[in-house]
Image (cartoon, rainbow, N blue to C red):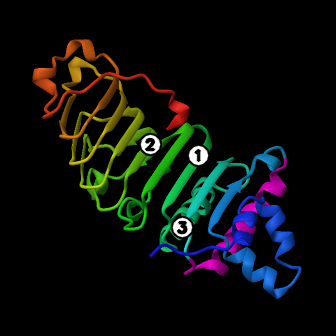
Amino acid sequence: MEPQFSNTHRVLSSLSMEDISRLRVVSKKWREMCISIPILHFNDLRYRNNETKQAQLMSYIDRFWLLRIGMDTQSCYVRWFLRSSLFDEEEEHSHILSWMENSVRCNVELLNVEIILEKNADFPLPPHILRSKSLKYLRIHLNNGILNFPSSLTTFGFSSLQFLSLKSVEMDEGAKSLIITSCSLEQFVILFATGLHHVDVSAKILKLLILYWGFDPSSNKTLQISAPKLKNLFLMGDISNFSSEDYFKHSCTTGIVTRNYSDF
């Protein structure tokens, strides 16, 4: 049974965290309502030119999660600019990672994370995020950074995830392949993937696959697909050097489609 949320909750979900922080001190009732809102938005846009205010907001969100642990979360949106001048790099990343992990502990269904990092910075992908049983929609997009896959995640499956979109993906050194199996995944998007030599996707109900992958014949990159329901396949790279008979295995007719990356 899906959790029931009041109209007041839905109105509160449209407010910024700054407004929530002010409203929750009005009374005990409002405090409880603010803490239990089902849709969370963490956005530092207002304070990107004010490092002190940005750090204060980050600390408030940390405390906010401590108060709502165990409460169901429908959706969590994070849009943040990470700057090394606020904290050391490891501490800086730990704040965002803890928000993602806490959302999973609160049975989040939709997790949408967009992070702007300083040039060429790494951002680790938390292993148990992809193993969540409640998560249906996951979008992690990085700008000016690398989403780092640990070698322990080169093979994984999903039981409930329906949509997965990853941007700026790089594998750990030594991890050259990515193998995905799923009985629930319907749409899978990888943009700007590097360090991958082999991708194997096995998904019974997958309908859309978008892969921006720099194919290079000299590196012997291969893609194997087992997706009987696949309708749309979009690949970007030096794919002219590959033949479908040699590199693509699937049991249905696929079409090449063009999509706007901002939609994913």
Magenta-span inclusion, residue 98: no
**Which residue type does callout 2 highlight?**
Leu
Which residue has dot 2 on it?
A: 166
Residue 229, how many percent across, how many down?
A: 23, 40
Magenta: main secondary structure equals helix
Total marks shown come to: 3
Q: What segment carries the magenta color?
A: 50-71
Residue under pointer 1: 114
Residue drawn at x 57%, y 79% is: 71
Question: Which residue is drawn at the image coordinates 24% and 27% (left, top)?
Answer: 254
Distance from Cα at disc 1 to Cα at disc 2: 10 Å
Question: How packed is label 1: few (under 14 Cα within 10 Å), some, or many (20 or more)?
Answer: some
Mark sitting earlier along the chain (1/3): 3
Local secondary structure at mark 3: helix
Would residue 64 be counted in the magenta stretch?
A: yes
SS for callout 2: strand
At label 1, which amino acid type do we have?
Glu
